[in-house]
Amino acid sequence: MADVYASPGEPFFWFHHTFVDRVWRIWELADTANRYTSIDGTDINGNPLTLDTVIYMGGIRPDVTIRQIINTLSGDKLCYRYNY
């Protein structure tokens, strides 16, 4: 998956991302009142994560903040939800 242009041609790529999305939805449903406003952890440099931490997209698309994509149904970046 290191090659961002070729990896979507690998079938395992889709299994991996579908599983990540599934785990994300299960996590969201566990505490819907707080999941879009709380964050914990550090980035690769040890800096604390915040909702305004920028996610570098490697030039594939514009960079985004965690706040812009933490809720897959809000804003103009994402627009999907899995039902379980």
Image (cartoon, helix red, strand yellow):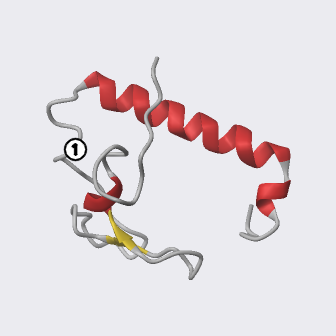
Q: Amino acid at mark 1?
A: Tyr
Image location (x, y in percent) of residue 78: 42, 52
Q: Quadrant of residue 11?
A: top right
Image location (x, y in percent) of residue 80: 45, 40
Which is nearer the eye, 65 or 48? 65
> How many numbered discs sit on the rendered protein?
1
Image: 74 above or below 66? above
Q: Quadrant of residue 12?
A: top right
Image: 26 above or below 24? above
Which is nearer the eye, 24 or 41? 24
Q: Quick one: SS at disc 1?
A: loop
Q: Which residue is at 47% across, 29% downward?
A: 82
**In this figure, which residue is indicated by the disc labeled 1?**
36
Image location (x, y in percent) of residue 67: 25, 59
Image location (x, y in percent) of residue 34: 16, 36
Query: Relative to residue 51, is residue 18 drawn left or right?
Result: right
Which is nearer the eye, 18 or 49? 18
- What quarter of the picture does the N terminus occupy? bottom right
Query: As drawn, which residue projects farthest toward the top?
Result: 84
Query: Relative to residue 60, is residue 43 drawn left or right?
Result: left
Q: Which residue is at 28% across, 73% downward?
A: 47
Q: Would you call the spot at circle 1 few (<14 residues within 10 Å), some (14-19), or many (20 or more)?
A: some
Image: 60 above or below 32? below
Query: Relative to residue 78, is residue 68 drawn left or right?
Result: left
